[in-house]
Image (cartoon, rainbow, N blue to C red):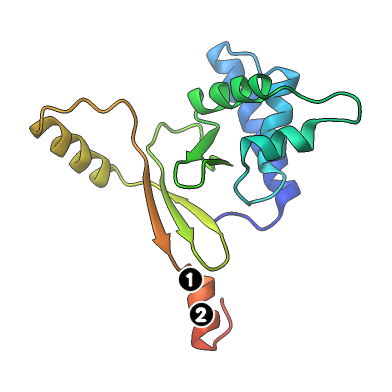
Amino acid sequence: MPCTHSTHCATEAMARAEAICLARGARLTPMRRAVLAEIWGGHDASKAYDLIDRLSQPGHAIKPPTVYRALDFLLAHGLIHRIESLNAFIGCHHPHTPHQAILLICDRCGDIEEQSSESLNTLLQTLAGESGFAPSRQSVELRGTCRHCLTVTAGTSPS
């Protein structure tokens, strides 16, 4: 479950990103760092144009290609995930481990939880292979109601 303390998460995410980029010989430029910090600044999904608005300053608007290039870099290095159905981005909770994220999206509160499952990924690869299909990327998103919202609806307090 994602942390509810955004500052703590952002600090840890930035440290992990620095270490990952250093180990891979990749450069976490000031813009890439700023985009990642904005994404981790809260646990809500961030859309590209929202990032542009938040990063722009009076008299100096950030251009869309600049943010999109930063997003492409962060995606390529597994530091963020793209939420296809929302056309938005969230920080990856374990970028040091290669994985395919399964995103659980709550329709009530908007919370997004990241999970992964090797058995599901293997099954999807097998199904694609049996069909002669070569996937270039994978996106698994489940929409529904999170544990917190189910608990609130049931009239008990969440643990």
Q: Secondary structure at mark 1?
A: helix
The extreme bottom residue here reads: 155
Residue beneath disc 1: 147
Q: Nearer the viewer, residue 151 or 86?
A: 86
Which image quarter is the C terminus in? Answer: bottom right
Q: Position of residue 81 (x, y in %)?
A: 50, 38
Residue at 54% over, 23% down: 72
Q: Position of residue 155 (x, y in %)?
A: 54, 89
Q: Nearer the viewer, residue 45 or 40?
A: 45
Compared with residue 78, is residue 2 higher up or lower down, i.e. above or below? below
Q: Position of residue 36 (x, y in %)?
A: 66, 33
Q: Are marks 1 and 2 in contact (CB under 8 Å)?
A: yes
Residue beneath disc 2: 151
Residue at 72% over, 22% down: 63
Compared with residue 16, is residue 23 higher up or lower down, i.e. above or below? above
Q: Position of residue 114 (x, y in %)?
A: 47, 49
Residue at 44% over, 33% down: 97
Mark pair 1, 2: CA separation = 6 Å
Q: Within the image, what quadrant is residue 25 found in?
A: top right
Amino acid type assigned to the residue bearing label 2 in the image:
Thr
Q: Residues within 10 Å of mark 1 (few under 14, many from 20)?
A: few
Q: Secondary structure at mark 2?
A: helix
The extreme right residue here reads: 58
Q: Within the image, what quadrant is residue 28 found in?
A: top right
Q: Residues within 10 Å of mark 2 (few under 14, many from 20)?
A: some
| Position of residue 53 in the picture relative to residue 79 (left or right) | right
| Position of residue 11 in the picture relative to residue 126 (left or right) | right
The extreme top residue here reads: 25
